[in-house]
Image (spheres, rainbow, N blue to C red):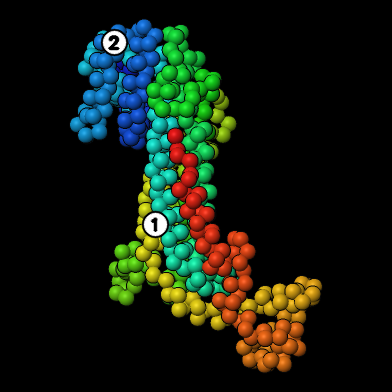
């Protein structure tokens, strides 16, 4: 039994108990295997709490200094892998408090006054997620920067734009790449807005009803870099919006990553042959010597499933849970860690794949010989001449149907036939450069629009709010 904890089994709460926990109950409750990742923030929150106790007159400056030093020592031991966890340690919070008490005896026993693991675990997890959010922000920004760079290189590269994965209308590769970029810019914005709400300190809320010790939650919040302190102690220990919202934002981001990955897999498919993944981002086959597989893209696509599942796990956990702390809430951490880890794994890999992707611009241009890509341009040429669109659409469709039945195409029409159709010189419109150049409107695929768009997106990234 650990000295000073009383009762049985060495638990911090053992005083009220006569028997130690059943080993299987202890095994079920023990969260150290995953919550040890909170150690650094548990120490920081502990130091802020020590100062609150000192401000309130419960610790002398010397005592506070000794507690801070012991907390820092324990934190270093954990960080360096030298810390001896005890079998009785339930979680990282109890392990750290127990170790401080092992060092300082009666003084260590003063640490937990006015504090509960219920408010502490929320403080730790908020700080952990805010730090992860800052890393994800930097990784997302790098991905957008890579997309903008590739888009600028390919502002003039024509390719068939698709709907239903079928050739639709010519676009530029730069335009398509920036479409992914804007999605990630929204992810950055979502994470930044989430961070503002998440920057709320729960410390001082205690188990559920604050304390009688006159601690100052605003001061503790400021010491930890939080924007504000809780407004309601029951909400402070019950609220896991910050976890659920992080997971929602992460799931949306992972969805965007999967859609970019799907384009990489499709473009590099040999039946299309529009791009090649660099060898460093491809994999071979254990059996077929010729293979170069797009595993990086496929895994980036597949990982979106687990991030969505992480969100669903926490949504289900919280639904219908009465207010107040429940041990159920211990289940919030693994999904949160998993989603952050997954984004931190996928983002750099996909950024590297994008930055090193080799585009076959000749193959993309050759694919633009598909005449159907220009059908809408022809219909719009008729509209510019006053033909109602529905009629222009029908006339163009009928022309295509007749040509197909005659086993020829638009390229075979002579000047008289073009004039009869109502678009004199129409053959000049069967050209991807002309088609794209005619779309100079803002947000369109012309090279000029792509350059404006690339500058705008780069500015959004450069000027984005800094996560608190
Ligand atoms: N390990 C716990 C968790 O992650 C810490 C809070 C424990 N509180 C309690 N009342 N048992 O939620």
Q: Is residue 109 visible?
A: no
The answer to whether residue 401 is left or right of residue 305 is right
Query: Residue 246's spot in the image, x, y percent?
Result: 49, 40
Query: Residue 216's spot in the image, x, y percent?
Result: 44, 14
Front in this rendered view, residue 195 or 296 = 195
Mark 1 near mark 2, Cβ–Cβ under 8 Å? no
- The residue that appears at 63% across and 81% down in the rendered structure is 429
Asked if the residue at label 1 sits under 8 Å from ligand 1, the reply is: no
Task: Work out whether 58 lies above or below 449.
Answer: above
**Crowd band around label 2 with a 10 angstrom C-alpha radius: few (<14), some (14–19), many (20+):** some
Task: From the image, tell me which residue sits under label 1.
Answer: 351
- The residue that appears at 50% across and 59% down in the rendered structure is 454
Front in this rendered view, residue 22 or 461 = 461
CA–CA distance in space, label 1 to label 2: 50 Å
Task: Work out whether 91 lies above or below 19.
Answer: below
Q: Which mark is residue 61?
A: 2
Residue 425 placement: quadrant: bottom right
Front in this rendered view, residue 22 or 288 = 288
Q: Circle 2 — which element?
A: helix
**Crowd band around label 1 with a 10 angstrom C-alpha radius: few (<14), some (14–19), many (20+):** many
């Amino acid at each position: 039994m650990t000295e000073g904890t009383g009762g049985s089994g060495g638990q911090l709460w053992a005083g009220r108990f006569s028997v130690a926990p059943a080993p299987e109950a202890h095994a079920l409750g023990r969260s150290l295997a995953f919550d040890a990742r909170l150690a650094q923030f548990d120490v920081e929150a502990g130091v802020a709490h020590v100062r609150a106790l000192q401000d309130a007159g419960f610790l002398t400056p010397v005592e506070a200094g000794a507690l801070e030093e012991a907390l820092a020592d324990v934190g270093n031991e954990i960080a360096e892998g030298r810390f001896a966890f005890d079998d009785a340690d339930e979680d990282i919070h109890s392990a750290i408090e127990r170790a401080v008490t092992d060092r300082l005896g009666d003084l260590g026993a003063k640490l937990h006054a006015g504090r509960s693991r219920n408010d502490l675990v929320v403080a730790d997890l908020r700080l952990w997620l805010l730090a992860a959010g800052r890393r994800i922000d930097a990784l997302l920004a790098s991905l957008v920067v890579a997309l903008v760079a590739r888009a600028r290189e390919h502002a003039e590269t024509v390719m068939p734009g698709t709907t239903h994965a079928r050739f639709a209308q010519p676009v530029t590769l730069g335009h398509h790449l920036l479409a992914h970029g804007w999605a990630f810019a929204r992810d950055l914005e979502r994470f930044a807005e989430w961070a503002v709400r998440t920057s709320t300190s729960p410390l001082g809320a205690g188990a559920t009803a604050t304390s009688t010790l006159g601690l100052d939650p605003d001061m503790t919040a400021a010491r930890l870099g939080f924007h504000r302190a809780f407004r309601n102690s029951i909400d402070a220990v019950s609220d896991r919006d910050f976890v659920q919202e992080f997971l929602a934002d992460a799931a949306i981001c992972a969805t965007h990553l999967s859609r970019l990955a799907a384009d990489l897999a499709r473009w590099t498919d040999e039946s299309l042959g529009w791009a090649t993944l660099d060898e460093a981002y491809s994999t071979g086959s254990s059996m077929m010597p010729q293979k170069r597989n797009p595993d990086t893209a496929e895994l980036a696509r597949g990982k979106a499933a687990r991030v969505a599942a992480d969100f669903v796990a926490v949504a289900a956990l919280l639904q219908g849970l009465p207010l107040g702390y429940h041990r159920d809430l211990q289940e919030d951490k693994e999904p949160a860690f998993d989603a952050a880890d997954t984004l931190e794994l996928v983002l750099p890999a996909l950024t590297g794949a994008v930055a090193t992707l080799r585009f076959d611009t000749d193959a993309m241009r050759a694919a633009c010989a598909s005449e159907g890509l220009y059908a809408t341009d022809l219909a719009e040429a008729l509209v510019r001449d006053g033909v109602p669109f529905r009629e222009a659409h029908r006339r163009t469709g009928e022309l295509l149907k007749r040509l197909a039945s005659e086993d020829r195409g638009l390229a075979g029409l002579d000047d008289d036939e073009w004039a009869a159709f109502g678009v004199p010189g129409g053959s000049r419109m069967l050209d991807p450069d002309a088609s794209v150049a005619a779309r100079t409107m803002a947000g369109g695929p012309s090279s000029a629009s792509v350059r404006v768009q690339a500058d705008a997106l780069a500015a959004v990234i450069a000027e984005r709010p800094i996560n608190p």
